[in-house]
Image (spheres, rainbow, N blue to C red):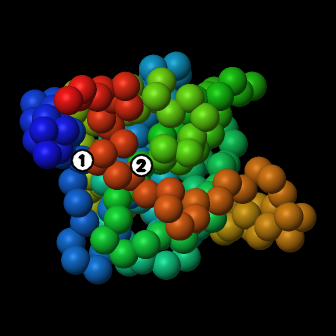
Amino acid sequence: MKKIILLLLFCSFFGFSQVIESPKEGKVLVYFTRYDATGFLINFKYFDGDKYLGKFNHGKYLVYECDPGQHIIWSKSENMDFIDADLEANRTYIIDSRPQMGAFKAGVKLVIINKELENYDRYKKRIYKSIENGTRYSITDEELKADESELKELIARGLEKYNKLKAEDSERIEVLSNGMFFDKTFFVEKDYTVKE
């Protein structure tokens, strides 16, 4: 019992549960973050299949609410990066956008943040801080109208590339499967134990 009480106090003290939201009943929340400041001025564009979610640079994050089920999550910079996502109802997911070296500007690599991730302990604090200290981004109608002309062609090219990679059974498409959701208890230090 002492362990549970101290664990709850630890979580509430550091505000983990307050920063990361839970979805509405029957829905899914996907956080797109960008903690790495490399290429900080470059905007990455985000999509769910043929739906444009917006673009932002370092210091911001996006919270996307959607229905559970199969989704093609992808991002565009100099390159395109894709995730096949099977999203579970009532779950929250975190996808970090890592800048990659590009020929003319930064490329993007989408990384699913979950307890199975190699170097998870290294990333969890950075991700939390990028959300806590970042600015929440929401796409505006003006942005949608300004980007409308190029979006149709970009989405067609992106989905064509995805389908080509899928047909080749490419390892370049990450897979987000059951159990890879964010769990608030993952942010508690694993070495934090209470001795009785």
Give amino acid for label 2: Ile
In the picture, measured across the screen, residue 4 lies left or right of residue 26, that is left
User: In the rendered image, which quarter is residue 83 located in?
Assistant: bottom right
- In the image, taking residue 66 as reference, residue 1 lies left or right, namely left
Q: Name the residue under label 1.
A: 20
Q: Which mark is residue 112?
A: none
Residue at 21% in and 72% down: 24
Tell me residue 152's x, y (percent): 57, 67
Residue depicted at x 63% and y 64%:
84
Q: How many marks?
A: 2
Observer-nearest of 83 and 163: 83
Identify residue type, mark 1. Ile
Q: Is residue 111 visible?
A: yes
Residues tagged 2 and 1 counted as in contact (Cβ below 8 A)? yes
- The x, y position of residue 58, in whole percent, is 40, 29
The secondary element bearing badge 2 is classed as strand
x and y percentages locating residue 91 in the rendered image: 35, 65
- Mark earlier in primary sequence (2, 1): 1
Task: Assign the N terminus to one quadrant of the image.
Answer: top left
**Residue, far front:** 196
Residue ID at (51%, 39%)? 97
In this view, 20 is above or below 176? above
Identified at 50% across, 57% down, the residue is: 180
Q: In which quarter of the image is the C terminus?
A: top left
Which residue is label 2 attached to? 94
**Which type of secondary structure does the marked residue at label 1 adopt?**
loop
